[in-house]
Image (tube, helix red, strand yellow):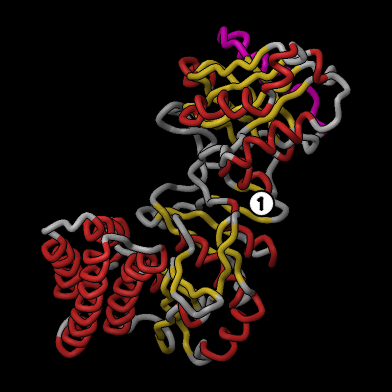
Amino acid sequence: MERVARILEGDPHTRLGVVLSACRGVTDALLDLCTAAEKQDATIADRLEAVRKRHVVIADTLLDGASRDEYIAILDQDCRNIAGILETVRMIRSASRNVRELVAGFGEIWSTRLFVRYLQKRAKRPGKIAWVDARDIVVVDWGSLGPTVRWDESRANTARLIPQDAGTLIITGFIARDAKGLQTTLGRNGSDFSGSIFGALLEAEEIHIWTDVDGVLSADPRLVPDATVIDSLSYNEAMELAYFGAKVLHPQTMAPAVMKSIPIWIRNTFAPEKAGTLICEKPDSKLAVKGITSIDKVALANVEGAGMIGVPGTAHRLFGALRDNGISVILISQGSSEHSICFAVPEAEAEQTEAVVRQAFDSELRQGQIQSVEVTRGCSILAVVGDGMAGSHGVAAKVFGALGTAAVSVKAIAQGASERNISVVIDGKQASRAL
């Protein structure tokens, strides 16, 4: 918190919206309390006290006098409320989603209430410093793709409740309300999403996401030691890299910023002097390829048969069956002959995938119209990402030439019409060498 305060005090902007997450591990600890209550665990009171004590220690270190006493009094009341909720869960042995989200959201409330008092005590930021409870501002609906912001209501709340005379707004991340007024959360990495939402609501010039890395890296540094920080990315490049597990924002997190064309900076809290990575609509970069990344623990499924050729709806039946069973498809590859379709799924779903596909095409398998359904475990997907690949000659040749030279066998290939991503499925044991 001292480090964050120094970063904010060194920022030249007179108006800042600052979205904070919970202290590290607190959200998980609160969710674990709900699980423990369902199991009627006898240690619940001690575990809640440990979470409380952690915040008391921080408050004792950073605050003093009436400010400290006021914070502890509110914290204690919250903990009593949580204890009452957990006792109800313990009695009925079930914690609903609403209950879990209510309890999990206290981490951000406690961290921001503490930090706003600390920043006010230091008195080094220009203007008034105000606390903003995101539950009063952000309204969301939860659907199959996660939370969707109700922008009209959220903008109206922003205009009505955000103090116009404040120079610095300290805002709770992660939490919001649904259309019924019930507290909800924005899912994992929700504070980053909150930052993007408030960036759009406050019509920010820029959004800075402060994390624990120097920016978006060109590859996983644990596997590629000479990976470098990418200076700038387009929104689309960042989304491609994020999908493949790169240390970057979740695609959904970027959506509000993309909607308003607000540049996003990825910065390192522990090295604020470093430039970081800029994510924007039209980055100024001469690099054709921005990042090379991978997904491990993948299974490759192949459905093959002469009976599929020229038959409309085969792919619809296949992927409809997978959808109905909650199986996420990571990659799809099909030759123009239509003789086979191969696709990649998480390895943990390999057995279920084979069973679902065999059931969906049971009649065709028995009649010999489809000859085989094979699932190969232990695969990885390697992806080469960059907007500059579009229209550039020889990029694919370099990719497959490098893999060939390294004796890495390619099992499947996929490339979208945008030419922004070339993905290949390879043996998982060769993933590190391939990268």
Query: Residue 71 magenta-drawn?
Result: no
Q: Quadrant of the N terminus?
A: bottom left
Please state the horizontal and vertical placement of residue 334, each as a whole percent of the image: 76, 23
Rendering quarter of residue 105:
bottom left
Q: Does the magenta run of residues contain 392?
A: yes
**Please, is residue 388 above or below residue 355 in the view?**
below
Q: Nearer the viewer, residue 213 or 131?
A: 131
Q: Where is residue 366 in the image (x, y as percent from the top left)?
A: 69, 14
Q: Is residue 375 above or below residue 161?
A: above
One can see residue 348 in this view:
yes
Give the residue at x 19% y 75%: 59
What residue is at 81 percent from the left and 33 percent from the top? 313
Give the residue at x 65% y 36%.
321
At label 1, counting other C-alpha atoms closer than 10 Å, the crowd grade (few under 14, some 14-19, many 20 or more) is: many
**Quadrant in the rendering for residue 75:** bottom left
Task: Name the foreground residue: 224 vs 429.
Answer: 429
Q: What residue type is labelled 1?
A: Tyr
The residue where tag 1 is placed is 235
Out of 1 and 42, give the one closest to the viewer. Answer: 42
Q: Is residue 175 above or below residue 357?
A: below
Q: Is residue 61 left or right of residue 211?
A: left
Point out residue 103 in the picture as x, y percentages from the top left corner. Answer: 32, 68
Task: Check disc 1 and report its element: helix, strand or loop.
Answer: helix
- Residue found 63% across the figure and 63% down from its top: 257
Q: What stretch is highlighted in magenta?
A: 391-410
Front residue of 159 and 270 = 159
| Left or right: where 291 falls relative to 184 | right
